[in-house]
Amino acid sequence: MFDIFIKTHFAGAHHLREYPGNCEQPHGHNWKVQVTVRATELDELGMGIDFKVLKKQVNEVVDQLDHRDLNEHPAFLNQNPSSEHIAVFLFEQLKETLHHDRYDIYSVTVRETDNSGLTYYGPGVGA
């Protein structure tokens, strides 16, 4: 079993509706993202998934969030663009393109700062 990951980032603004504090005001982050794919076997070249393929798929989705007001993104019109919801959004957008006989998306980690973040594993993992 192999856990293969890439790291990327995006900059964006958001505010948390009805939050009892400063985060209710518009502000920005340089979010850091890690996407991990779990491979059960390797291909004929000895790879679970080519890093180039993984980067391309992830960046196509992350680019939808980069330099945007996330509150105006269709995915967040009815829910706060919290790091948790951002991780779910990324996971859901990637689960079909990062699915193969050898591998599947395993987790998405989103960090607002170097010291604060979370990892989302998708429904049913660890349950």
Image (cartoon, grey):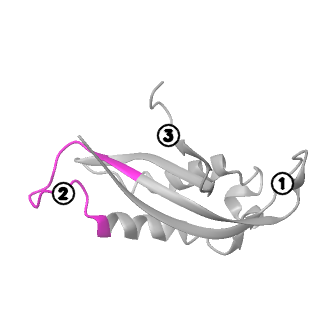
The mark closer to the camera, 1 or 3, is 1
Which numbered tag is attached to residue 79? none
The disc labelled 1 sits on which kind of residue? Cys
Q: Residues within 10 Å of mark 1 (few under 14, many from 20)?
A: some
Task: Verify CB contact (< 8 Å) between mark 2 and mark 1.
Answer: no
Q: Which residue is mark 3?
A: 122
Cα gap from disc 3 to disc 2, whole angstroms: 24 Å
Cα gap from disc 1 to disc 3, whole angstroms: 26 Å
- Extreme residue in the left direction: 44
Magenta range is 36-52
Please give left or right for residue 13 compared with residue 103 in the image. right
Q: Work out whether residue 98 or residue 28 is closer to the camera in this orientation and state it.
A: 28
Residue at 86% over, 51% down: 17
| x and y, in percent, of residue 57 in the image | 40, 66
What is the count of numbered marks? 3
Element at label 2? loop
Task: Verify CB contact (< 8 Å) between mark 3 and mark 2.
Answer: no
The mark closer to the camera, 3 or 2, is 2
Q: Magenta stretch: residue 28 in it?
A: no
Q: Magenta stretch: residue 48 in it?
A: yes
Q: Which residue is mark 1?
A: 23
Dot 2 or dot 1, earlier in sequence: 1
| x and y, in percent, of residue 119 in the image | 53, 43
- Is 112 situated above or below 67? above
